[in-house]
Amino acid sequence: MNTKLTLTIEKEVIKIAKEYAKEKGQSLSEMVENYFKFVTVERMKLKEKQLSPKVRKLRGIIKTEDNFDYKKILTEELAKKHGV
């Protein structure tokens, strides 16, 4: 069952996120929902059928080292992008 969620986000962030979602062929709602599923996977014990078909198709195709720190790399890349 889907439920409406209202978020307060900076206009520029919304604009960029909508463009990104469009480039990826999904709605902003799908993108946000998939992100929430990703970050809460341990709590939800996410089942395969709960993922969108696009995410299900991509799941497991990227292999990383055991010590891969996604948050550290994301922080570094965002800092580079935004000149921080």
Image (cartoon, rainbow, N blue to C red):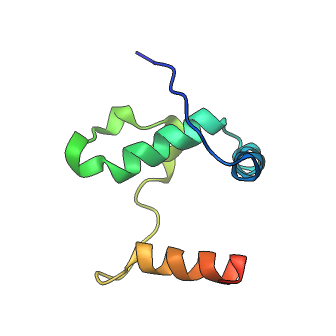
Residue for point 42% across, 38% down: 51
Going 76% across and 52% down the picture, which residue do you hit? 12
Does residue 45 show up? Answer: no
Report the number of discs.
Answer: 0
- Residue 32 is left or right of residue 63, and the answer is right
Above or below — where is 6 with respect to 76?
A: above
With 30 as the anchor, is 20 left or right in this view?
A: right
Up-down relation of residue 15 to residue 5 (above or below): below
Horizontal placement of 79 versus 23: left or right? left
Q: As rendered, which of 23 and 36 lies closer to the eye?
A: 36
Image location (x, y in percent) of residue 35:
47, 48
Position of the C terminus, as image quadrant, is bottom right
Residue found at x 71% / y 42%: 25
Q: Position of residue 22 (x, y in %)?
A: 76, 43
Q: Residue at x 57, y 43 (%)?
A: 31
- Can residue 18 be seen in the rendering of this structure? yes
Q: Position of residue 76 (x, y in %)?
A: 55, 83
Q: Quadrant of the N terminus?
A: top left
Placement of 58 over or under 79, stated as above or below: above
Give percent across and percent down for residue 30: 57, 36
The outermost residue toward the top is: 1
